[in-house]
Image (cartoon, rainbow, N blue to C red):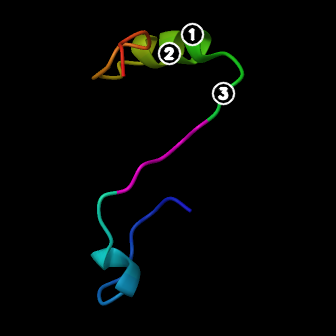
Amino acid sequence: MIGTLGVGDPMSDLAPVNVYVAVDDADAHHARAVTAGAEIVRDLNAPR
């Protein structure tokens, strides 16, 4: 689920979270995002 929580929702007290998304071709997905104007905050090949 992606969206906002209602006021008083106990889930709204949780922090921070991570989201994992799997795509077939990360390089193509990255290129489309850059072309669409996405701000890249960490390079795909950056060490972890």
Question: Disc 2 residue type?
Answer: His
Q: Assign the magenta stretch its main secondary structure.
A: loop
Can you say whether 27 is above or below 42 in the image? Answer: above
* Residue linked to disc 2: 30
Q: Tell me: 28 left or right of 33.
A: right
The reply to whether dot 2 and dot 1 touch (C-beta < 8 Å) is yes
Which contiguous range is marked in magenta? Answer: 17-21
Image position, residue 9 (x, y; %): 37, 86
Please name whichever residue, 6 or 18, is drawn nearer the observer in this view of the structure.
Answer: 18
Establish if 4 lies above or below 27: below
Residue 11 location in percent, x, y? 39, 78
Q: Nearer the viewer, residue 47 or 18?
A: 47
Callout count: 3
How far is mark 3 from mark 1, CA to CA?
Answer: 9 Å
Residue bearing mark 3: 23
Asked whether 16 or 2 is in front, the reply is: 16
Residue identified by numbered label 1: 27
SS for tag 1? helix
